[in-house]
Every structure is written in structure tokens, then in C-alpha cells.
Image (cartoon, helix red, strand yellow):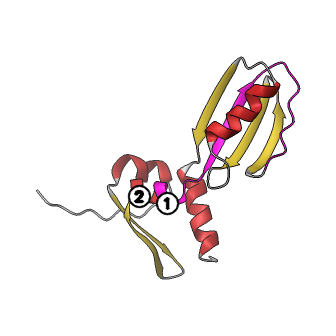
Amino acid sequence: KKVTIILTTHDMADIEALAKRIVLIGKGKVLYDGSLLKLKHKYDTNKKIKIITNDKLTIKKKGVLSSKKIADGYEFVIDCKTLNVSDFLNVVTKNISIKDIEIDNESIDDIIVDLYKEYEI
């Protein structure tokens, strides 16, 4: 019926569940106006990768933004503009035996924070 509803919120879960189009405003400026999918494609460049293993693992490679030991393995954040997931996993699998792998996209909250940083807000 071509109805427009304007919802103002800081709850990104609401936005992901309800909105087809979003307008992000910071300090009175429109920072982004478009679909949530396009926003994710533009700014979702980091992947969180959890490697479940009993082996010791140290990766020092350009594009690895962070790494930490967790109870059942390691958790990495990689910058996919610099290092793609496939290349990262090739390095990992050459060095250790892997029980499981989990790969997550950056949360929409983190994407918004990155956008605000870009615009110095």
C-alpha cells in the first residue's frame, strides 16, 4: 500500500528486522541513505573466525587484525580487504589439526561504529 513509517532507534536488531531502507544521521548530517544490505556490503569487511583445535596456533600475517586464545581454540578477526578467508584458512590448515571452524560477519553495531569513525562522529 506504499506506506512509509519513520522509526528512530538505536536498537540495531529492530532495524535489521524491520527496515528495508535506512537513513543514518550523525551530528545533523546524513551519513548513509539506502538499503541495509548495501550498507553491509560496503562496510562489512571484517570476519570473526573461531578455530577449534587442541594445537598451539600463532598466525602473524598481514590482514589479521586480532587473535586471542579461547577455551577450545583461537579466535581471529581478519580484514577481508587485505586477507581473504580462503587464504587465511590455507595458512591455518598447514600448521594444525582443526576440529571445527566458525565464521561470523561483523555485527551491524560494529559496522555503524566504523561508519561513524569514518565521518569522525
In front of the other: 22 or 14: 22
Q: Residue furthest left?
A: 1
Rendering coords of residue 1 (x, y %): 10, 56
Residues in magenta, as a range: 40-61
Rendering coords of residue 11 (x, y %): 50, 54
Amino acid found under the numbered disc labelled 1: Lys
Above or below residue 9? Residue 68 is above
Rendering coords of residue 41 (x, y %): 47, 55
SS of the residue under disc 1: helix
Verify whether residue 75 appears in magenta: no
Residue labelled with disc 1: 42
For label 1, the crowd category at 10 Å Cα-Cα, with few meaning under 14, some 14 to 19 and many 20 or more, is few
Q: Which residue shows up at 78% across the image and 18% down it?
A: 97
Q: Are marks 1 and 2 in contact (CB under 8 Å)?
A: yes
Q: Which residue shows up at 80% across the image and 47% down it?
A: 61
Residue labelled with disc 2: 38
Q: Which residue shows up at 77% across the image and 52% down it?
A: 62
Amino acid found under the numbered disc labelled 2: Lys
Above or below residue 75? Residue 96 is above
Residue 55, numbered label: none
